[in-house]
Amino acid sequence: MRAKFEKVIRDAQDSICKAIEDVDGKKFHQDAWTRADGGGGISRVLQDGNVFEKAGVNVSVVYGSMPPEAYRAATGNNELLKNKGDIGRVPFFAAGISSVMHPRNPHCPTMHFNYRYFETEEWNGIPGSGGLEVALISLPATLTRRHEALSWRLQTGLRPSRPYLLREI
């Protein structure tokens, strides 16, 4: 599943960027990065385009281990780790594609999507778990500034799009 999902998101990044470049007439700038504890990704940004003020299409594939507290927060399952003592760190794998596109036209909505996969391996007698998440947000065309968009997200109860768990690991 890991290899298949990684191929899907890398192919999607290529095809989305090509389609946007074909429409916009400008090219994405690409940066590859690595994560010291395992994995990495590719960030692609188109800035000051003909159609898009800014567009980003990013892929991350990371792995390693996380503290039990992060596992508890990610799963919401406090009972699973009760009375387990020192169980060590939990092995995980996470991958995803994320995109935000801000058109130049103030009447066109900003678009944002995430497609993510996360799993933990079986460890210390606790079964592995995982799942997919898809999130698509199209902000109203009247909200063109980033601070207005954030305010709208918070008022409507939509959570921030970045997975806080991966930042904590």
Image (tube, rainbow, N blue to C red):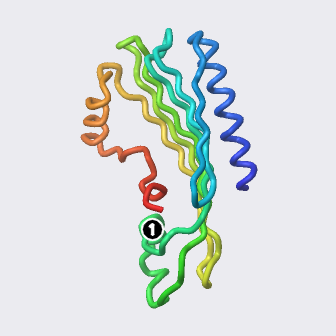
Q: Is label 1 in a helix, a strand or a loop? A: helix
Name the kind of residue labelled 1 in the image. Answer: Ala
The front one of 127 and 38 is 38
Quadrant of the rendered image containing residue 42: top right
Q: Is residue 152 above or below residue 124?
A: above
**In the image: residue 8, left or right of residue 43:** right
User: Residue 1's spot in the image, x, y percent?
Assistant: 73, 55
User: Residue 34's spot in the image, x, y percent?
Assistant: 60, 49
Quadrant of the rendered image containing residue 141: top left
Q: Is residue 83 above or below residue 126?
A: below
Q: Residue at x 70, y 41 (%)?
A: 8
Q: Residue at x 59, y 43 (%)?
A: 33
User: Residue 131's spot in the image, x, y percent?
Assistant: 59, 58
Q: Residue at x 49, y 25 (%)?
A: 55
Q: Is residue 35 above or below residue 32?
A: below
User: Residue 60's spot in the image, x, y percent?
Assistant: 59, 46
Residue bearing the label numbered 1: 70
Q: Is residue 90 above or below residue 39?
A: below
Q: Residue at x 32, y 21 (%)?
A: 144
**In the image: residue 75, left or right of residue 123:** left
Quadrant of the rendered image containing residue 150: top left
The front one of 37 and 100 is 37
